[in-house]
Image (tube, grey):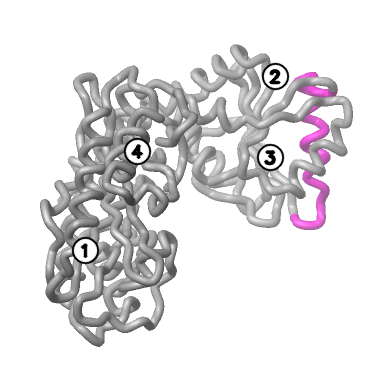
Amino acid sequence: SNLPMLKAILLPMIASGSKRIGRLAEELRGAGIDAIFTCTPISMGYLHGFHEGGGERFLTLAVRADGTTRMICPGLSATQARRSGIEDVRSWKDGEDPLAHFRQLAEDWNLRSAILAVEDDMPAYMLLQMQEALPAALFKPGQEVLAKLMRVKEPGEIELMRRAGKIADEALPAALRIIRPGVTELDVEEALMSEMRRLGGRPLFCIVATGANGAEPHHMSDETKIADGDVIVLDFGCTVDGYLSDITRTVCCGSASDEAKKVYDTVLRAHNAGRATINPGVACQDVDRAARRVIEGAGYGEFFMHRTGHGIGMRGHEEPFIIEGNALPLAPGHCFSVEPGIYLPGKFGVRIENIVTCTENGHESLNAEPAGELIEC
């Protein structure tokens, strides 16, 4: 049984989770914010272990700058909220006005003319209702306050991502076994998703892009049949206890052309150059520059049109972003992708992606190393 191992990972996270509200309150005070309103299963789950959304119903976990919390939620969710340790839960039934609880909160916390933050993913209908209820309050984005906490991962979080990464690594052979002329992208996608599930992950996404489809970085797998000589981009991941993996490998069906081998080698060198730059204190944009410099030097600069990486944790894309213009210094605990690519319209694409975490002495890859040359299936 993996129960002892799971407890060893989760119990320290639960203990540290009890400190997260306090750390958030400290950030709110530093930013001059009186209270923040969160509403997504990710942010509320991170802060208080409540992993449930409201859908079309008004639901929010409010945190005051002194560390006080209150949840306003549908009666459907009240029991789960209390079970997660939220002591002050104000629930409402369908047909009742949830804003009555919000107005009461404003009275209790003196928020009528306060500075209030909301997370980026708050539905517009919720924000508009809150603004109408408190016309003198100033509402502002609160994502940066949350990101300061969430972008530095605790050891237990990194271990879960390590496990998710290992599952993605071990799923790859299932795709390689079935790649042959006539097999569709969706066939390969199903093989990867099924294998991640069999290995204990919860499959989250999968892109299989063969031939010219690989020149579209976010191609959606379809019925396109793989042909001999096709370069194939495989981008997939799963979750383990809410934490994500995200890996991209590029392979070839049959013998690869000299051009495909050259592009793969260029992207691999760019990937390694970006990773070699990672150290505490290094600006995020410097990792992007290092990878991009290799691709531009090889004459493919115009065909690398996206950032080198994105942060990852409970969200697939979060801070820190590895992109030109982001001078944020890397710090131990930052987890992010390094995924340069070259996309030749009408021909093929190549992308190589590992998830890494910044350490005191450089970085650790949460995935196995990519192949040193283009794999021919």
The disc at residue 336 is 4
Give the mark nearer the N terminus: 4 vs 3: 3
Q: Nearer the viewer, residue 325 or 358?
A: 325
Disc ID at residue 72: 3
Q: Position of residue 216 (x, y in %)?
A: 42, 64
Q: Residues within 10 Å of mark 4 (few under 14, many from 20)?
A: many
Q: Which residue is mark 1?
A: 259
**Direction from residue 160 to residue 317 in the image, left or right:** right
Q: Is residue 151 left or right of residue 74?
A: left
The answer for how far apart the CA atoms under marks 4 and 3 are is 33 Å
Looking at marks 1 and 2 on the same chain, the residue that comes earlier in the sequence is marked by 2
Q: Earlier in the sequence, mark 1 or mark 3?
A: 3
Q: Position of residue 32 (x, y in %)?
A: 67, 14
Classed neighbour count for the residue bearing mark 3: other residues with Cα under 10 Å, few (<14), some (14–19), many (≥20)? many
Find out whether residue 6 is within the magenta segment: no
Q: CA distance from mark 1 to mark 2?
A: 58 Å
